[in-house]
Amino acid sequence: MTNHGNSPMGHGRPVVRRRIPEGAEVRVAELYWDAFGRKLGPALNPPETAREFIAAHLHHDRGVAALIDGEVVGVAGYQLGGRALTGGGARDVLSTYGTLRGLPRLMLLALLSRTPAAHELVMDGIAVSPVHRGRGIGSLLLTEVAALAAGHGCRRIRLDVIDVNPRARALYERHGFAAARTERTPYLRDLMGFSAVTTMYRPITVADSREER
């Protein structure tokens, strides 16, 4: 775990923690929905139900959180060992939305699912509070995820970025991610708000291993 900055949390400096703090589930769900609600909306709407679903099924040990004055202001979710930050299986979806409305939602969620390859950590993305953007929190989260991946013996990090989020792609590129392929999905524009998904990779380096220590 890395504690970035020499000032205590009370001075307004972000502190990065591995694991989502207990009691922060609703806050993390709000941040996550603010960042990814456009993409997840068709599968999890209405928003209030979606946020409740995300909060109820979080895997705390699959997230890195940035806190300022004890409040979570940013989160990076990742998938490793068959578990991701956002949980909830088919039974949970059907229980929440009902069978008739739940089945098509499961199909949409399946379109968004990704399985890590061997020695690979898959990121679910980064969500930062709008009022704290521009303070380098996304960079802190990415640095911590890379160190975490190194500690787990991973050789690379993989993520997907949609075409309507150029700001996120620029952040990833600044941190060593390179585009590998782009899948055109024009049939999803009206349904999910994007028409292309680019897969990006970043190799784990010796510097990441030093950060882990």
Image: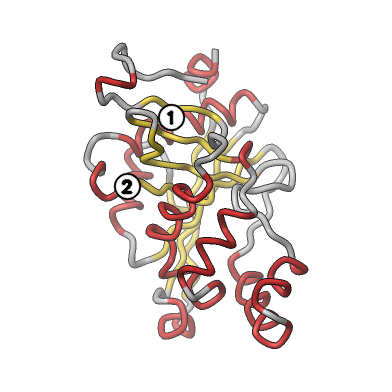
Identify whether 114 is placed above or below 21: below
Q: Tell me if 1 is positioned left or right of 14 in this view.
A: right
Q: Depth check: give the residue in front, 205 or 69.
A: 69
Q: Residue at x 72, y 75 (%)?
A: 94
**In front here: 131 or 147?**
131
Residue 180 rendering spot, x and y as whole percentages: 49, 54
Of mark 1 and mark 2, the one earlier in the sequence is: 2
Helix, strand or loop at label 1? It is helix
Q: Amino acid at mark 1?
A: Thr
Residue labelled with disc 1: 143
Res 68 → quadrant: top left
Is 52 located above or below residue 206 in the figure?
below
Crowding at dot 2, Cα within 10 Å, few <14 / some 14-19 / many 20+, comes out as some
Q: Amino acid at mark 2?
A: Ser
Question: Which residue is depicted at the point 57% across and 36% down?
Answer: 22
Please count the marks in the image: 2
Of the numbered discs in the image, which one, if any, rests on residue 169? Answer: none
The residue under label 2 is 129
Measuring 28% from the left and 34% from the top, which residue is drawn there? 136
